[in-house]
Image (cartoon, rainbow, N blue to C red):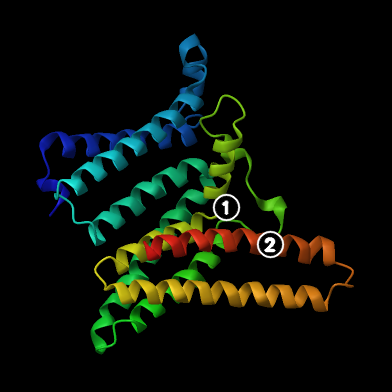
Amino acid sequence: GSLWKAPKWTRSSFLAAGVVAAISVVIYNYGQLLGLATAASSAVWCQDWHLWCARLTMASVVVQLVTLSIAAASGHVRTGRQLWMIVAFVTTSLLMLLHRPRNQTPLLILLVLAVSVLRFLHSLSADGPDHQWPAVRAAIVCQWFGRAGHFALGGSNGFATIDISGAYTGLSGYSATLVGCFSGLILFSGPLVFFLVLLAHLSESSKGAWFSSARTVVACRAWCALTCTFVMIVLRSHLFIWSVFSPRFMFEILEVLADTVKVMLLLV
């Protein structure tokens, strides 16, 4: 099945929402360079153009995901590689809205890199009769590149580099739930992009491949968590135990929680 063979209203809704989301992201990030901020300041109803552009983008993303779910349920989109690739692209557009403009190009590069690497791994999957080793290999690569993507987007092992300002995108006030969710999306943008592409890679694999991939994620995270814990115990009297090792351990706890969600999705 293909999205282009879906009913006209489904196809039109998906494409229209995508165009609206792309235009809204451009206006939200580059409105001042386009001179829209000066023009909007003269109209009372346009004074909050940043807020409305962000909300319009989020609404467009929701419309795209709902339309995609309807198309998948009706059989017009395979619940496999094509579906998860579209979800990865739509999610990346939302992440571009939450991140600062300087991180938008690296986000697109990470998405292209994830697709290219896993396509290369998929071309190697037919080398032998073992269908579990390719899944293990893909999971290791996604864990590694996802972690590298965290640093590529300006992250570090310290809390000072967490971009909290982007978590208030589209909000007129404080909401603990929304701010927490947006902060998590910003913090784990790199791993999220690679994980969605990993789901697309495994979509046409057997249940054994999904289980092998989940075990690989657990093994990688357990190794990192145990190593970090061991280093903290050995260096507990170090001068930088609270300024360096403690934030790293807190990040490790957050990554354990994130990988737990990954494993649950892989085992469903």
Residue 240 appears in the rendering: yes
Report crowding for label 1: few under 14, some 14 to 19, many 20 or more residues within 10 A (C-alpha): many
Seen at 47% across and 49% down, the residue is 104
Q: Residue 87 in the image: x percent, y percent?
A: 33, 51
Residue 120 appears in the rendering: no
Q: Which quarter of the figure has residue 176?
A: top right
Q: Which three-letter amino acid code belongs to the residue tagged 1?
A: Leu
Residue 73 or 122: which is nearer the viewer? 73
In the picture, measured across the screen, residue 85 lies left or right of residue 51, that is left
Q: Residue 177 in the image: x percent, y percent?
A: 57, 37
Q: Which quarter of the figure has residue 201?
A: bottom left
Seen at 58% across and 34% down, the residue is 168
- State the residue position of label 2: 157
Q: Secondary structure at mark 1?
A: helix
Seen at 49% across and 70% down, the residue is 143
Q: Residue 229 in the image: x percent, y percent?
A: 72, 73
